[in-house]
Amino acid sequence: MAGTVSQALFCLAYARTARHTHWPLALAAGGLAFALSTLALRWLPLSLVPLAVVALASLLACRRFMPRVAPARRAARTRLPWWDIPARMVVSTGFVLLLTGVASHLGPRLTGLVTPFPIYAAILVVFTHALEGPARAAGMLRGLLLGLYCFVGFFLVLATLLERAGIAPAFAAAIAVMLAIQGGALWALRRGATA
């Protein structure tokens, strides 16, 4: 759950930087925010409930400070270049191999904090930013922040029930909570789209 704080700060730093620059600097800002947050969390041991509170507070704060950019209107749907999906696949695989390769050198606690690095979010936002602009990238990151509530709910329930209830009931309850939170998030997105 501690990684949620770092992911939220990644989203905020990327989106705010993207308003004024291109994707390489925005990605660097997001990566730096993630790294600094991860290092700070490494030295801040929190028990389960305070950690959940910190994670939820970071999501609320980052959503509050995300830039509000009106998306540019497009006359027709933009056709993505032929290389878009293969490039995303190559970049994703490279990131996974890199993180897997360095995990043994980081130790278990730091590996646990680094593991939630938003690899796929970074790839999605960079390609969205490069091909569709910073407004669409910020919109994607807003959606990611909303989805991270599921992450917190899932791991809070799992950590609470795993030893008490056993593997199957703990995972079943965590998945049920995650689906309920996801349903609420989708409802909030649809409500916001119609408002």
Image (tube, grey):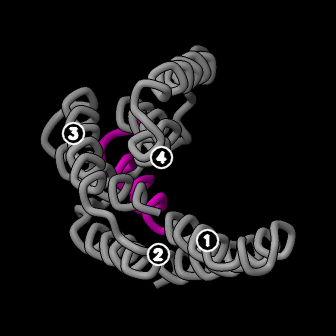
Q: Alpha carbon of mark 1 to alpha carbon of mark 4: how far?
A: 14 Å
Question: Are the two marked residues, 1 and 2, in contact with CB atoms closer than 8 angstroms?
Answer: yes
Question: Marks 4/3: CA distance?
Answer: 18 Å
Residue position for label 2: 48
**Residue 183 within the segment the image draws in magenta:** no
For label 3, the crowd category at 10 Å Cα-Cα, with few meaning under 14, some 14 to 19 and many 20 or more, is: some
Mark 1 or mark 2: whose residue is earlier in sequence = 2
Q: What's the amino acid at mark 2?
A: Leu
* Figure check: 82 above or below 133: above
Q: Are marks 4 and 2 in contact (CB under 8 Å)?
A: no
Query: Which amino acid, by three-letter code, is at mark 1?
Result: Ala
Q: Position of residue 14 (x, y in %)?
A: 26, 46
SS under mark 1: helix
Look at mark 4 in the image and give the residue it sits on: 112
| Labels 4 and 3 touching (C-beta < 8 A) | no
Mark 2 lies on a secondary structure that is helix
Q: Tell me the mark number nearer the camera, choosing from 3 and 2.
A: 2
Residue holding disc 1:
159
Which stretch is magenta? 132-146
Q: Is residue 53 left or right of residue 143?
A: left
Image position, residue 1 (x, y; %): 47, 63
Name the chief secondary structure element in magenta.
helix
Secondary structure of the residue carrying tag 3 is helix
Dot 1: within a 10 Å radius of its alpha carbon, few (fewer than 14), some, or many (20 or more) residues? some
Q: Earlier in the sequence, mark 1 or mark 3?
A: 3
Q: Earlier in the sequence, mark 4 or mark 2?
A: 2
Q: Residue at x 81, y 66 (%)?
A: 167
Q: Is residue 104 above or below residue 38?
A: above
